[in-house]
Amino acid sequence: MSRPDLSPAALGAAALARLEAAGHTRIDPPILQPADVFLDLTGEDIRRRLFLTSGADGRELCLRPDFTIPVCRQHLESEPAYRRDDYCYAGPVFRQRPGELGEIPQVGAESLGRADREDADAAMLALALSVLADLGLAHPVVRIGDETLFSAVLAGLDLPVVWQRRLRDLFGEGERLTAAITRMSGAGAPSDQRRDARLGFLAALEGANPDAAQEVVADLLSIAGISAVGGRSASEIAERFLEQAALASGAGSHQTAAAILSEYLAISGRPDESADTLEAFATRHGLDLAAPLAAFRARTAAMASHGLDLTQIRFAADFGRRLDYYTGFVFEVSVSDPAQGGTLLGGGRYDRLLRLLGASDEVPAVGFSLWLDRLTAVLEARA
């Protein structure tokens, strides 16, 4: 008896057929994409791994590092942007990955324009898990998170806007987020001369108005013979320095908020049980989490109605995905043995993305991508 074909190509074809049978239309966006879109809208983790090139006109281009942005850009070529469309895709994405190939075969799905967000979230997770089951992956580890809840906690802590923005940007980056919260609380490494000099420069900038700060930064770049850093202009770099100055001046003055955040980020468990834990947490600290909690409960009920076993799904308050365009519910699927690979499938909600790409308003959107090379490795190890 011959062994089944577990190659990425075979798995991708089977997954694509399953997605098309579920009503998703196949889409094949170009491999070459404008680099500025990804530099602006993806997280630092993706930005530093782009394969960059230039067109004949000098425009900076990149090999697509994911499918979501290219799919949304192609969706916006037709009107209206808020129309309901379900897409699927298969093909390579390109990211620099130490120890792994830079060309990564993926298959995935995107659902745009569904106003019933919580049911759409649950349906997308159910579809993702059914695809994996069809491909032969049994009993995966499923983890979910919710950036909307984290943002609501931040909003209720009376933190300066600059700290809220900084912590929100770091959500999902465990060690860096923990370090920022530690710094905010006043704990941390002892001072050294270089750090003191840097803080002195930031303190001087904090007292300057934005125009003066921009002039200082522009002069420093000019003296160093640098016209821009990482594609950022002098004004953008000056704005970043001013933000750093505000962060430095506020470090150590928010111990209570830091303790509450640390307590929140430690919450985890089954989604139905976590809802009660979150409600008790909000009551204990006087936080208004009513709206995101109602959505959380509705999504959990929708998961059950779509046949998902809630005992096999774990909510983690500290879990987020390292892409800047995610706005709420996120999920990932892996295997219990870390030696068999990392995340096999990841997805979530990204309602802001189409507006950032040019739509006149937000468009409800949720999707997922499956790493076919990793799935092949897992299935072959189990065969």
Image (cartoon, rainbow, N blue to C red):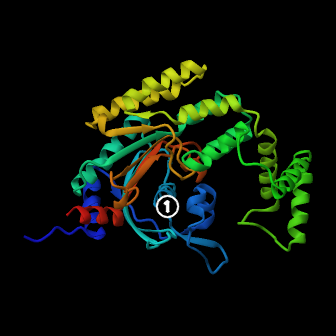
Q: What's the amino acid at mark 1?
A: Pro
Q: Position of residue 40 (x, y in %)?
A: 63, 57
Which residue appears farthest toward the front when viewing the image?
190
Residue 203: x, y in percent?
88, 47
Q: Which residue is pictured at 50% across the width and 71% down the height?
A: 98
In the picture shown, does residue 1 fall above or below 202?
below
Q: Is residue 366 left or right of residue 45?
A: left
Instruction: Assign a secondary structure to mark 1.
Output: helix
Q: Quadrant of residue 263?
A: top right
Residue positioned most to the bottom: 56
Instruction: Give the position of the N terminus as an image quadrant.
Output: bottom left
Residue at 48% across / 59% down in the picture?
74
Q: Which residue is mark 1?
A: 70
Residue 83 visible at all: no
Q: Quadrant of residue 360?
A: top right
Q: 2 and 316: which one is in front?
A: 316
| Residue neighbourhood size for the residue with mark 1, other residues' Cα within 10 Å, grouped as few (<14), some (14–19), many (≥20) | many
Give percent across and percent down for residue 246.
80, 43
Residue placed at 31% from the left, 43% from the top?
A: 126
Q: Residue at x 54, y 53 (%)?
A: 323
Which of the pair 264/307 is nearer the observer?
264
On screen, residue 170 versus residue 334, left or right, reads right
